């Protein structure tokens, strides 16, 4: 297989690589491993081999740039009605760490309308510089105009790292821009660090629905782009004494757009949006029946929290998708997360494992949820929840 | 085991199996509990081109035979024998037209049935005419260009939901068994209404109703074949569709075995899975043996019939008796293997046991079938 | 309306167990499947082509065995299948994949709409849709939950957002990525399966589509995986024992003593 081969003299036939390959592309021939054409060069086997018996050679890459010409950490600050979204602050939080490790500046880029206030807030939250493109026509997010402007800024200013939120807009903007610039983009990073050896960005993210973690680099292209999910990184405390530079760059704002946003419709009228809740009570298939979700709502209400759900219950039609927590739902990081009748499949954990305190209630003592729970109760949710509700009601009177 | 199905038969089986597992299984218990007719499943069967598997290509069908129909019924029945009946009952109501219809009659009715936009039903049984089909009271009197039907049919599968009904009525009382004729009656014909919907032990997702004819006038073109041939039409139809009932029983039995086997691997008592106990193993083995034997008989009978056999009443009867008796025994044993859980409505096997019973009764009770088999054997002996 | 649906083969390994000691995946047979999100793209493509009497082509980039999977899509409404298969494509990240697919699409030629699934279950990056649109130089909208109107040169669709949706207009040709709220994928039909049996999957190499090999595979991929590992969950767990009453009481006490921002609800 081009690019990767087994070093037969080092291979001891332990078969660790065979098990590590998600594509079943390694077979044993005469007690040595052999890589077949099913290999997709994902590299999982290289990490698994304890004997350095897999040689993964990368040749030259196309469109490589002189990375030394790029510096600075950038954060795309998503905004709504002139107010930065909290994801922007979270990105500044991790951006600050990266900038300090690199000894470079942290800049926020904000595109929209009526942004003076927003700029001040971004600086208070950690930005050294804010690039602001303020125009009435840019009030609403538009793929066409925003990608044009953002690309112009990147070409002109050459940041080494660009972070965006893995939000609806971020996940549309980031790949379009990365494709335009011919650089690398890593999505849904759960960890970002600077490699002390050469200053490049180490991007760690889940793969295979969270069954594996992968660390990814973009060594020869710039900027190194990454998206991060809401509630994964922590914001800094606002520091009003911080000062920073506000820059109004000279960019060409595209008019006569072909992509037009005609209407914005709100369908979810939650009092406490799931991702902002400090307390979430979540129910899974172990609740047994959709009507038992009333207990979940009741406990959530008593505690002033929000209702969450596993994918299984949403797919079964017990509750709307807006409540879904998990890899294909929302990522939450509340102070307290109750997992009731939820087994703890990796995809669900991906959505809530950064919660501060996790409580699991499940009939099955072997349920994977107990491995991540701070407190676990092995029991019947139908028995425990009413009692819990009673206890909290009494205590909070 | 490889049943040596053709590629097309394999495709039909796969599609039916997916519909059964993905679409029928999730709603089976609910439709049974509430007696809901599976219109939505019929639409899915129609969209997948399964409704016409046994209908000739020139009338919009796939051009298969009884074997293809049986494969569909078996797979659907693994998930729910009652829901499968919307399809199987239509087959029963359609076969008189396939076997005895004129080209015009076929052109008029078969394409819609093949497309799944219309269902069919077969009207033979009456309150006083079950096993003794010759006791039919419903009359059809020729009046000018029309036949006038009067009488009531009982326990008709798909009654009320079907659009096309093939009905056996008496045209000449003096001729005894040669005095019956077969007719096609469409839903909505004035004078044709439906009586009560029965509340059954099993196959509750299937609708079983009375057909009521009160001076119901149908065009004389709706006579099937010839006056006096009604009994022949009925018998030839049932001979051919009996493997369909057999395959329904087969599917129910297989579904029950699959549940019991899975459960026996999960349930632990005395520190091990109950599948470790010889008593349970022997029960499971016997269930499996009976099912494979039934399947072999049903498949062979289907191939025999589709292969052009001239007379197959005996084989057809054998397949139905053996498969339905097997289904009854297997489902009872499945409940037993699952113990207390098997008895609970939350688990699917008690329904399967209730569903299995009818297969020993309808389309000719197993007692009548045994008569038929013995008489055929004696006839063959005498014929030598 | 001619539609091209881009799909990806993914291993059906998400139902997987981990061997913590050896840091490896225990595979229960690596059955390849079409990425589940792509089945919604296929269904939408089939519906559009049926409503507008057009043609739907399914396109994928992968190893030769993917051709069998593509054939199955013919049984659920696709008309033709194209597979881009070449050793030069192995090791592609999202950028290289977007490039290769765009060259394949250019060779297919006549199209009005390209549909992709929201994201792939293995990489989960959701990047190829927009990346592909960029390479083709056409507009795109992600997370489409419904197409309100589609006609010659024009599409109006609903993009799902965190709290509702936006209505977006674009000229055609364009790329959309779809979410599962958009439709209910059909099951194969008998006629469909028979058609699939007779269908030949067109297989193109990098040369067939005029792709610059330097922009494909490893050399065309700016990102690289340097390490893969099994996620650790190091948590101090405390199991609360006792009768349900005791468990509830103990848990409530512990949580209250940790002084979270539990808001008291006023009883009316």
Image (tube, rainbow, N blue to C red):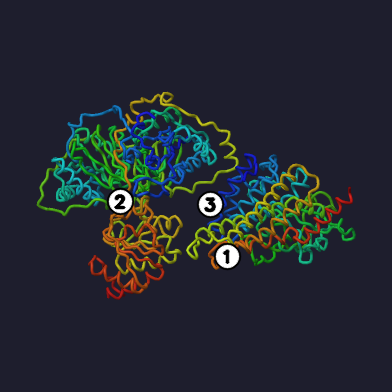
Front-most of residues B47 and A58: A58
Do marks 1 and 2 share a subunit? no
The residue to which callout 3 is attached is B22
Residue C47 image point, x, y percent: 50, 42
How packed mark 3 is, by other alpha carbons closer than 10 Å (few <14, some 14-19, many 20 or more), is few
B32 displayed left or right of A173: right
Q: Which mark is residue C232?
A: 2
Q: Is residue A271 visible?
A: no
Q: Do pointers 3 and 1 mark residues of a single chain?
A: yes
Q: CA distance from mark 2 to mark 3?
A: 35 Å
Please identify the quarter of the rendering in which residue A154 is found: top left
Residue drawn at (38%, 32%) of the image: C90
Pointers 2 and 3 in contact (CB under 8 A)? no
- Asked if one can make out residue A235 in the rendered structure from this viewpoint, the answer is yes
What is the x, y in percent for residue A338? 33, 63
Q: Are marks 1 and 2 in contact (CB under 8 Å)?
A: no
Give the x, y percent position of residue C147: 43, 44
Q: CA distance from mark 1 to mark 2?
A: 46 Å
Give the secondary structure at mark 1.
Answer: helix
How dense is the environment of label 2, judged by Cα within 10 Å: few (below 14), some, or many (20 and up)? few
Tell me: A265 left or right of C77: left
Q: Nearer the viewer, mark 2 or mark 3?
A: 2
Chain letter of disc 3? B
Quarter of the image where one finds residue B359 = bottom right
CA gap between label 3 and label 1 equals: 19 Å
Give SS at disc 3: helix
Left-right relation of C190 to C265: right
Please give the chain letter of the residue carrying mark 1. Answer: B
Q: Mark 1 sits on what residue?
A: B33
């Amino acid at each position: 297989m081009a690019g990767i081969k087994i070093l037969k003299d080092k291979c001891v036939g332990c078969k660790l690589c065979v098990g590590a390959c998600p594509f079943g592309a390694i077979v044993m021939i005469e007690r040595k491993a052999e890589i077949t054409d099913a290999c997709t060069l994902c590299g999982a086997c290289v990490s698994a081999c304890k004997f350095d018996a897999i040689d993964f050679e990368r040749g030259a890459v196309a469109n490589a740039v002189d990375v030394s010409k790029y510096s600075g950490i950038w954060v795309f600050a998503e905004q709504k009605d002139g107010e930065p979204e909290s994801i922007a602050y979270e990105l500044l939080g991790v951006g600050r760490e990266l900038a300090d490790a690199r000894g470079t500046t942290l800049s926020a880029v904000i595109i929209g309308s009526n942004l003076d206030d927003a700029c001040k807030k971004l600086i208070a939250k950690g930005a050294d510089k804010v690039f602001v493109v303020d125009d009435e026509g840019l009030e609403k997010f538009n793929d066409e105009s925003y990608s044009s402007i953002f690309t112009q800024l990147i070409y002109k200013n050459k940041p080494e790292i660009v972070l965006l939120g893995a939000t609806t807009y971020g996940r549309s903007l980031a790949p379009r821009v990365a494709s335009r610039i011919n650089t690398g983009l890593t999505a849904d990073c759960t960890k970002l660090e600077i490699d002390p050896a050469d200053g490049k960005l180490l991007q760690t993210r889940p793969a295979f629905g969270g069954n594996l973690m992968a660390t990814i680099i973009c060594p020869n292209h710039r900027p190194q782009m990454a998206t991060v999910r809401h509630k994964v990184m922590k914001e800094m405390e606002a520091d009003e004494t911080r000062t920073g530079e506000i820059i109004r760059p000279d960019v060409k704002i595209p008019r006569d757009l072909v992509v037009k946003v005609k209407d914005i419709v709100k369908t979810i009228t939650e009092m406490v949006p799931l991702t902002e809740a400090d307390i979430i009570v979540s129910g899974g298939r172990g609740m047994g029946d959709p009507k038992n979700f009333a207990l979940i709502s009741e406990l959530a209400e008593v505690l002033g929290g929000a209702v969450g759900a596993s994918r299984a219950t949403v797919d079964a039609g017990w509750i709307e998708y807006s409540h879904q927590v998990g890899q294909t739902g929302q990522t939450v990081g509340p102070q307290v997360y109750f997992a009731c009748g939820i087994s703890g499949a990796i995809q669900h954990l991906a959505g809530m494992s950064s919660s501060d305190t996790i409580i699991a209630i499940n009939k099955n003592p072997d349920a994977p949820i107990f491995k991540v729970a701070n407190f676990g109760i092995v029991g019947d949710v139908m028995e425990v929840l009413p009692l819990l509700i009673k206890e909290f009601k009494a205590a909070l009177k | 085991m490889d049943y040596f199905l053709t590629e097309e038969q394999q495709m039909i089986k796969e599609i039916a199996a997916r519909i059964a597992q993905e679409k029928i299984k999730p709603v089976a218990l609910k439709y049974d509990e509430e007696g809901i007719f599976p219109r939505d499943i019929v639409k899915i069967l129609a969209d997948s081109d399964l409704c016409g598997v046994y209908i000739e290509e020139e009338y919009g069908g796939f051009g298969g035979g009884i074997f293809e129909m049986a494969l569909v019924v078996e797979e659907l029945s693994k998930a729910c024998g009652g829901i499968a009946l919307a399809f199987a009952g239509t087959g029963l109501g359609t076969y008189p037209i396939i076997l005895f219809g004129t080209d015009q009659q076929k052109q008029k009715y078969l394409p819609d049935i093949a497309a799944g936009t219309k269902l069919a039903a077969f009207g033979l049984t009456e309150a006083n005419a079950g096993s003794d089909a010759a006791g039919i009271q419903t009359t059809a009197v020729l009046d000018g260009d029309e036949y006038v039907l009067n009488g009531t049919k009982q326990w008709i599968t798909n009654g009320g939901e079907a659009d096309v009904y093939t009905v056996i009525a008496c045209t000449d009382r003096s001729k005894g068994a040669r005095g019956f004729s077969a007719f096609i009656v469409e839903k909505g014909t004035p004078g044709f209404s439906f009586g009560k919907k029965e509340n059954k032990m099993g196959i509750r997702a299937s609708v079983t109703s009375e057909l009521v004819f009160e001076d119901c006038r149908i065009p004389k073109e709706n006579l099937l074949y010839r006056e006096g041939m009604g009994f022949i039409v009925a018998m030839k139809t049932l001979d051919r569709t009996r493997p369909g009932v057999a395959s329904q029983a087969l599917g129910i039995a297989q579904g029950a075995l699959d549940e019991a086997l899975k459960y026996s691997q999960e349930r632990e008592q005395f520190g091990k899975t109950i599948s470790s106990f010889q008593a349970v193993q022997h029960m499971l083995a016997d269930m499996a043996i009976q099912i494979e034997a039934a399947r072999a008989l049903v498949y062979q009978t289907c191939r025999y019939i589709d292969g052009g056999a001239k007379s197959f009443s005996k084989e057809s009867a054998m397949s139905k008796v053996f498969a339905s008796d097997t289904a009854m025994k297997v489902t009872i044993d499945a409940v037993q293997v699952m113990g207390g859980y098997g008895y609970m409505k939350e688990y699917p096997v008690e329904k399967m046991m209730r569903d299995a019973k009818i297969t020993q009764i309808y389309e000719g009770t197993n007692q009548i079938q045994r008569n038929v088999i013995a008489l055929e054997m004696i006839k063959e002996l005498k014929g030598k | 309306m001619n539609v091209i649906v881009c799909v990806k083969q993914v291993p059906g390994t998400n139902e997987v167990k981990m061997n913590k000691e050896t840091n490896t995946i225990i595979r229960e047979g690596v059955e390849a499947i079409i990425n589940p999100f792509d089945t919604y793209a296929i269904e939408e493509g089939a519906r559009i082509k049926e409503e507008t009497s057009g043609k739907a082509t399914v396109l994928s980039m992968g190893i030769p065995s993917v051709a069998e999977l593509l054939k199955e899509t013919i049984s659920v409404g696709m008309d033709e299948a194209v597979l881009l298969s070449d050793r030069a494509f192995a090791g592609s990240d999202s950028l290289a994949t977007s490039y290769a697919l765009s060259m394949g699409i250019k060779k297919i030629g006549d199209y009005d709409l390209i549909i992709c699934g929201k994201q792939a279950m293995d990489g989960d990056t959701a990047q190829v849709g927009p990346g592909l649109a960029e390479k083709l130089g056409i507009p795109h909208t992600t997370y489409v939950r419904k197409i309100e109107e589609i006609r010659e040169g024009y599409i109006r669709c609903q993009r799902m957002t965190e709290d509702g949706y936006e209505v977006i207009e674009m000229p055609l040709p364009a790329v959309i990525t779809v979410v599962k709220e958009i439709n209910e994928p059909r099951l194969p039909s008998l006629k469909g399966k028979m058609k699939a049996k007779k269908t030949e999957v067109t297989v193109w190499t990098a040369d067939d589509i005029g792709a610059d090999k330097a922009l494909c595979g490893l050399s065309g991929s700016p990102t690289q995986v340097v390490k893969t590992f099994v996620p650790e969950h190091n948590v101090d767990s405390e199991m609360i024992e006792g009768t349900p009453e005791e468990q509830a009481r103990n848990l409530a006490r512990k949580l209250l003593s940790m002084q979270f921002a539990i808001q008291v609800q006023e009883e009316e």
